[in-house]
Image: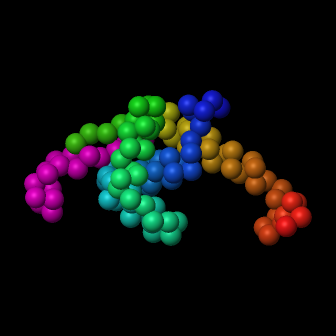
Amino acid sequence: MTRRQSLGEFEHLLLVAVLRLGDGAYGVSMKTEIEARTGRSVTLGAIYPTMDRLEARGFVTSSMGGPTGGRGGRSRRVFRVTTAGVEAAQKAYGVFRAMWDGVEAGSSRSGD
């Protein structure tokens, strides 16, 4: 997998969040999903540039949803994962699993 095809941790979290949310994936919902599942604080200022990069790489598409009453009539930018994005997320998951294969929880080989 080349660097362009590989995913960073945050990119992977965002792709999985979009997959989990389905058609309801937009900035705030992705933020909420990641925070609830990981306990990690996420800002919208980190989400949108990362989603722009994922879109440029062909891993997601975005469109403007219909106006919402709760946002003063403004539209939301909603995201969908492409086939290439699903494949990249699955590959990243497989890489982490392969690295963990055979490692026992709490073990350390560095002598710490």
Q: Residue at x 82, y 59 (%)?
A: 103
Along the line of sight, the residue nearer the viewer: 8 or 12: 8
Residue 32 location in percent, x, y? 38, 64
Q: Residue 62 magenta-drawn?
A: no
Q: Position of residue 92 (x, y in %)?
A: 62, 44
User: Does residue 91 appear to the left or right of 103 in the view shown?
Assistant: left
Depicted 62 relative to depicted 67: above or below: above
In the current view of this chain or complex, which residue is farthest to the front? 112
The part of the chain drawn in magenta is: 65-82
Q: Can residue 32 be spotted in the picture?
A: yes
Quadrant of the rendered image containing residue 33 = bottom left
Residue 87 picture location, percent across and down: 55, 37
Task: Please indicate, yes or no, whether residue 82 appears anywhere in the rendered image.
Answer: no
Q: Residue at 36% across / 47% down in the picture?
A: 48
Q: Residue at x 26, y 39 (%)?
A: 63
Front one among 109 and 97:
109
Q: Residue at x 50, y 46 (%)?
A: 11
Q: From the viewer's perspective, is residue 62 above or below residue 106?
A: above
Left or right for 16, reference 6: left
Q: Give coordinates of residue 93: x percent, y percent.
A: 63, 48
Quadrant position of the N terminus in the picture: top right
Please tell me which residue lies in front, 71 or 43.
43
